[in-house]
Amino acid sequence: MPDTNIVRLIRDQANIVEVVSAYVRLLPAGKNYKALCPFHQEKTPSFYVSPEKGLWHCFGCGAGGDVIDFVQRIEGLTFTEAIAKLARQLGIRWQPSVTTRREEWARERLLQLNQWAVEFYERVLWASEAGERARQYLFQRQISTSTARMFRLGYAPASWDVLVKAAQESGFQTNELLQAGLAQKVREGQGFIDRFRDRLMFPIFNPQGEPIGFGGRVLGEGEPKYLNTPETPLFQKRKVLYALNLARNAIREKGEAILVEGYMDAISLHQAGFTNTVATMGTALNADTVQILKRYTNRVIIAYDRDSAGLNAVMRSADLFRMNEMEVRFVDLPEGSDPDSFIKDFGAAGFRELLERAESLTKFRVTWLVRRYPGASSEGLQAAVKLLASITDPIEQKSCMQLLAEEWSGGQPERIGGLEQALHRALLQYLRQQRQPSQPVKPISADPISTSLTSSSVIPQGILQAEQDLMAAMVQDKECARKILSMLSPDEFLLSRHQELARLVSACLEEDSFADLPTLVGELGDEDLRQTLSGLLLRDLSFLSARNALEDRIQRLRRYKLEQLARHQRAELLRKMASGQISPDDPTLKVWQETLKALKT
């Protein structure tokens, strides 16, 4: 990890306008600069850079931070790599620690070995008789020579140890081959053999185009059909997206990524012109994958085989996209078809039509269920209830219920209301059955938004605007910060990230370090907090010219929270009445009445 002093020196000396200008065309906007955001597609500039504060923020996609954050995101680098790049540009001599130098040397050595292996496999594929079989396979799969060369495809010959011997002759050690996952020990004895044999080889690159691993498809008999590099210092399967090195610029230009399951799906789509395509590495969708995608876009189109295990996994993990405030849509491929076979059968135009008809998560979930249960049978109802119960967002749950009722109505609008009511009753019954009899009823949360308002999209826009205005005033103006915090505690803000930032501002006021807030952007460990703070620091404060601007907004927040509290209390009362648990002296009734009284004052 770079020394703290070096990091601060880079932040102080780097001219953020010059750094950003190397990637985007900045235009003056008062004391700031603006541009079309390089991280998502837009027609009107919403990307702002403040040379005074050393920060950038996009008010369209929410990305933001300091100069190091920008280089990390635009280049797809790690924090240490971004520091090293900026240090070189600024002429700052940075001597990493002995441990860091040793790790960097070992990493560089593995990269050199992988690069050598890429070239070795390529030579075998294109310049040897042994590669003829693999060349014929590519021809049968309609992969052109230019496409195969663009993806650096190769062939691992059937020989037991041809790569091991060639690598040793080139100066690489056996322990390096083992560490890179290119060789393995013989089960009995002291020898070593190639890990990949008689396989079409797919080199796997990081976003910077460095080879970090391989995937191999067996061409003859044998299992597994696909074999990947094991976990190595360079390659962690859950943190890799295949073809991202080729797709990242197109993803930014088009504002969205197409996500597929396999190597051949990604290669076929690139060949057909869909150059914003990446593939998961055979693992279920995970938080790391989603975070990698979010660096480049907030929109993802998933094109998985309809009956694949991967699609089921994505459906179960779809909340990851919502948690990261990303839009996700699904391509409805025909039965038994995958992107590779679809392109071959219907061409690029046919696939483009599928993309245009891609469905939202809610609609796709409904389509997926209705295809299996065309009518509101008892089995269909049970499946629908389980689907509805798995949806944590109440708005999406309601939308899904309405869509199911419409699909099952058989084109008879008069049936929709009855079906929706039946689904609602069945869901309540299912949830009651899931609750253990011995499990005590949870008390009403003191904060009514703690469970339902899991994302800012649930809060009415006017209320959210009021809170953002207060937060912007708090982080930019010391006197406003004192005034707001004297009237509103950090815990009274609606969004958890605003609560955390309010506590940070409070601490800065106590320590008389309020002026250091802009520099804290780069030191916050939470990326979401960094982006939120950078946006607030660049937000316009012209609303403060209005009379009682702060007081009015504080009052709106407090009233909204009271309204939400009353709604939750009423729902709890109705639940108790439905289950026969209510009594005249129930404290919930008294608390609800007190809340209603407070709303009237």
Image (spheres, rainbow, N blue to C red):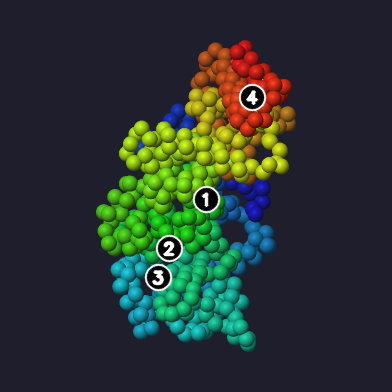
Q: Could you say which is closer to the camera, residue 466 or residue 473? A: 466
- Quarter of the image that includes the N terminus: bottom right
Q: Residues within 10 Å of mark 1 (few under 14, many from 20)?
A: some
Along the line of sight, the residue nearer the viewer: 347 or 543: 347
- Sequence-first disc among 1 and 4: 1
Q: Is label 4 in contact with label 2 (beta carbons under 8 Å)? A: no
Question: How far apart are labels 1 and 3 at the CA level?
Answer: 32 Å
Q: Nearer the viewer, mark 3 or mark 2?
A: 2
Q: Quadrant of residue 601?
A: top right
Q: Residue at x 31, y 60 (%)?
A: 342
The residue sitting at 63% across, 87% down in the picture is 189
Residue marked by disc 4: 481
- Tell whether 2 sits left or right of 398: right
- Residue linked to disc 3: 153
Q: Nearer the viewer, mark 4 or mark 2?
A: 2
Contact (Cβ within 8 Å) of mark 4 with mark 3: no
In this figure, which residue is indicated by the disc labeled 1? 317
Rendered view: 321 above or below 165: above
Residue at the (61%, 83%) spot, across then down: 187
